[in-house]
Image (tube, rainbow, N blue to C red):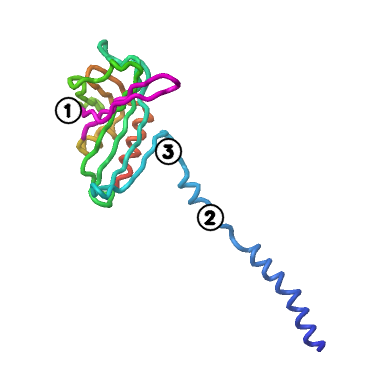
Amino acid sequence: MKSLLLILSFCVTVFPFTRIEFAQNSAPPPTSSVQASSSKPKHGGKIEAKYDGFAGETIIALKKMRITCEAFKGMQSALRDACVSFAVSLHCPGQQLDYVRYAKLSLIVETKDWQKRHPLDERDLTIVADGVRFRLGTMSLVGQDVENDRLVDVMREVLEVTVPYKTFLSIARAETVGMRLGKTEFELKDKNMEALRDLASRIKQ
């Protein structure tokens, strides 16, 4: 009987400390991977990738990003009191990011003056990247509506053009990029160029 009590007393005394020691020696879960995935790009743009099952393609896109709300070049510019943003998408056939079939460039114009819409003859887009000129043709009107911003109606116009992937790469790798939409000229900012380079880097080549 004394032997049994001695064994039980030994178990109660030793095993709890054994469990506590195991818990204290357990390593905490790593946090570096979580911190890395939550980091945001310095350029401030937003890049997303998704698969479109209906079109059978993977689209990786730089979402709408502001270029400027400042005064525009060109004496005949219709955009003196407007804001211009852009968006770019790369279209890859199938579920892969190794080959890009084509790119799309969108320009979003926002102004309080409805009369400053771009008629068909004012939609030709030319881009100059490090002195090399790319005539991308007439942009298509894909959207035109009015939004209320702080109790003021703002007209929004969305224009789009398809761009060869090689042309996109030439633009993204340039140091300076200027655009002319109709009679209006403007330049991409440093953060815009950083976002384009970030987008280009997402393709596995």
Q: Secondary structure at mark 3?
A: loop
Q: Position of residue 131 (x, y in %)?
A: 23, 25
Q: Which residue is mark 2?
A: 30
Against 31, is 39 above or below? above
For badge 2, the amino acid type reads: Pro
Q: Quadrant of residue 126?
A: top left
Task: Determine the CA span between mark 2 and mark 3.
Answer: 23 Å
Three-letter amino acid code at the position of disc 3: Pro
Type of amino acid at the residue the image marks with label 1 = Gly
Work out which residue is located at the far top of the displayed protein and give it. 75
State the image coordinates of residue 138 (x, y, percent, origin top left). 18, 26
Q: Crowdedness of circle 2 by 10 Å Cα count: few (<14), some, many (20+)?
A: few
CA gap between label 2 and label 1 equals: 52 Å
Q: Residue at x 59, y 60 (%)?
A: 27
Q: From this viewpoint, is residue 175 visible?
A: yes
Q: Which mark is residue 201?
A: none
Mark 3 = which residue?
41
Residue for badge 1: 137
* Image coords of residue 204 (percent x, y): 29, 48
Q: How many residues crowd mark 1 within 10 Å: few (<14), some (14–19), many (20+)?
A: few
Q: Earlier in the sequence, mark 2 or mark 1?
A: 2
Residue lying at the far right in this picture: please name it. Answer: 2
Residue 134 pos. (x, y %):
19, 28
In the rendered view of the protein, which quadrant contains the N terminus? bottom right
Tell me the element at label 2: loop
The image quadrant that residue 40 belongs to is top left
Which residue is found at the position 24% from the left and 38% from the top? 103
> In the image, which residues are magenta?
135-162
